Image (cartoon, rainbow, N blue to C red):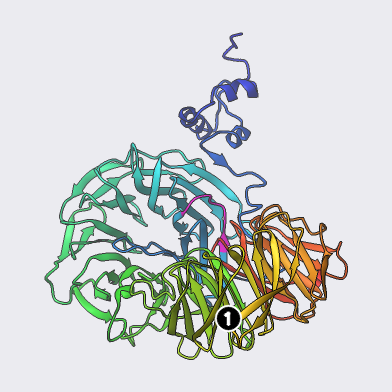
Amino acid sequence: PRRSRREPPTSSSVASACPSQRSVSRCLETSSSPPVHSPATHVPSFLFLNCPSIKMAAAGDSSNCFITDDKLVMHLSPNPISERGVPTTFYGHPKEPRVIYGAGNLVVVRSLENPSDNFVYRGHNATVTVAKFSPNGFWVASADETGKCRVWSWDNPEHILKIEVPVFAGRIVDLDWDPESKRIVAVGEGKTFSAKCFMWDTGNGVGEMIGHSKRITTCSYKPSRPFRIMTGGEDFKTVFFKGPPFAMDHSNTDHSKEVWSVRFSPDGNQLASVSSDKQIIFYDSKEGTVSQTIAADAAGMHTGSIMSCCWSPDSSKLLTVSMDKTAKIWDVGAGAVECEFTFGDDPQLADMQCGCEWVGDFLVSVNLAGEFLYLDPANPAAPANVVVGHQGPASTICTLPTGEFVTGGDSGQVLKWTDGVATKIIGNDAATRSTHGGKVVGVVSTPTSIVSVGWDDRVRFSSLDSMTVTSELETNGQPTSIAGSTTGLVAVGTTNNVVMFFKDDAFLFEAAVPDVPAALALLEEEELIVGCGNDVLAFALDLGNGAMTQSASGDGHRGAITTIAYSPDAAYVAVGDANREVKVWQRADWSKAKVSGKWVFHTAAVKCVTWDPTSSFIVSGAQDESVFIWNVNKVMKKRQIKNAHKGGVYSAAYLNEFTVATTGHDGCVALWNLEESK
């Protein structure tokens, strides 16, 4: 039945009026209308929770967006992934020495004073492309490759989501805030339009932003009145907008190649753009007309594409970085180079500079290898500090006698961690300096070196003194697993159903097994346990004759074996499988498992198991993102850490009696204090 105009609407009638994305704009216009609402047009705020395109703040929105478990003592974050010929965008906090950037599906906030002090936000379900603090420092706008922008609280300990806005159908490349922290401009590569300015709390559009014919790569919002926005793109143009509501005022075609970065100065009086044409162009910040150009043939100019620029806090200097492997500070008034940063006597491909930011007294750049470089004008020949991290899933871990630990990742990196700071083992890859050219399957420590094996079908031996690869050997097939012993013996399993043995940087022998050895564990030079399909096989080793003989087997697993670990006292063997179960076998009697059918609380395949130094507790991690702590002597006692790693927990290792380090699909390394769990 038709409802009277004066009759208050029911929730069902309003919901039916807003069933699809094309109706969302009407809902938003209603919600942001003047305070005097007509009963026939007012839309209850709760309806936005069910609206398919705009997601307003809700009580449960932040429940899995960051780790709240008090067992977490340190969260070591991944670094950004740099791509050749494309800027790496990151921004600084307006009041604190911190930077913010995207790493996979994460938003990372990293302290520049203490690089091990990190916060990781996990609210996105797609690759995060850009994130930026609001000028007041209270909020963060982060965007991803699906075109969604999330606005969430930084200063609130709950980091509550304010709103999630689908800006356009496509990848968001850059965004900026207005100086009042009320409007956001986002640009990228949408299907129908590629730039939009919207309100931070409702998602309402503020004008129509058109003018580019190709992907928009950069944007900047004038930090003072009158408000202006400039964008730059791959169509070689910069477009100047006046508003709000914003509309194109004019475009500039002074650049002859892709424009990678446009930035208003902090005082709002100047505006600069840089491009692949190796020019720096300055504009009148109010009218957007060209005021000064530093040409490509000017003295001291970069010899490669300029990828990014940023202003000093006093607006008198401009920092630029380039693919020519240099960074430069420009005196804007004189139009001349004040300082040039080089990166060693023989810069490599990895030293191409992809992004920069000036945060208080810190000058920071990011190179092609994804390393953060602290630039020091007093010593421009080398960075004052280099911060490295994983650039993808962290797949494996091993401990060192010193209390340090080593991790390997899918990007080929092998990192040694000391007090929360990583050092990279340098390999031969010119673009990344990674240890391997593919995923690192495993790492183990020996008395003389770190041994790693990767999908580049190489076993590499690395020195902890020089932090470089000293030798390598080829594997018989693609590696699947690795195990090491304190004597220096290393076993590597491959897809060719063989186990290869190495010692002292040399190959010893190989032996066939019934199936692909998906998991291995070594007991000195005495015994090897292999996970083949659903079976656990124990082999007695004879290194003198280069052979091994099966001595026992553990049956009863209902899933493929994924991980194996000896207890420190060598009395037990913990085994995890793809059917979510953790079993414990007694080496003295393999006929019956000590723990079987009881530890099946994971909801996905178990990826790792590790023992505490007392052989009383086992920590397991799984694809379900959870970590469980099991008590071998009280098998019904357990503790769970939920949401330990987004996408799954891949490896774990005890650093001491109470501290466990875990790695996962999110590229993070987490340290947990389990003292209260025992």
Residue extending furthest toward the top: 1
- Magenta stretch, main secondary structure, is loop
Q: Which residue appears at 44% of the width and 81% of the height? A: 472
Closest to the observer: 223 or 597? Answer: 597
Instruction: Characterize the local packing of mark 1: few (<14), some (14-19) or many (20 or more) Cα atoms within 10 angstroms.
Output: many
Left or right, 49 with respect to 352, comes to right
- From the image, which quarter does the C terminus lie in? bottom right
Where 38 sits versus 249, above or below? Answer: above
Q: Which residue appears at 54% of the width and 80% of the height? A: 509
Left or right, 230 with respect to 614, comes to left
- From the image, which quarter does the N terminus lie in? top right
Percent from the top left, x then y, of residue 336?
19, 76
Percent from the top left, x then y, of residue 416?
53, 80
Residue range highlighted in magenta: 120-127
The stretch drawn in magenta includes residue 482: no
Quarter of the figure with residue 10: top right
Q: Which residue appears at 52% of the width and 65% of the height? A: 496
Closest to the observer: 235 or 198? Answer: 235
Q: Which residue appears at 43% of the width and 69% of the height? A: 456
Instruction: Give the total number of marks visible in the rendering.
Output: 1
Percent from the top left, x then y, of residue 503?
55, 86
Which residue type does callout 1 highlight? Val
The stretch drawn in magenta includes residue 121: yes
Under circle 1, the secondary element is strand
Closest to the observer: 377 or 550? Answer: 550
Residue that carries the numbered disc 1 in the rendered image: 490
Where 262 sits versus 659, above or below? Answer: above
Where 629 sits versus 187, above or below? Answer: below
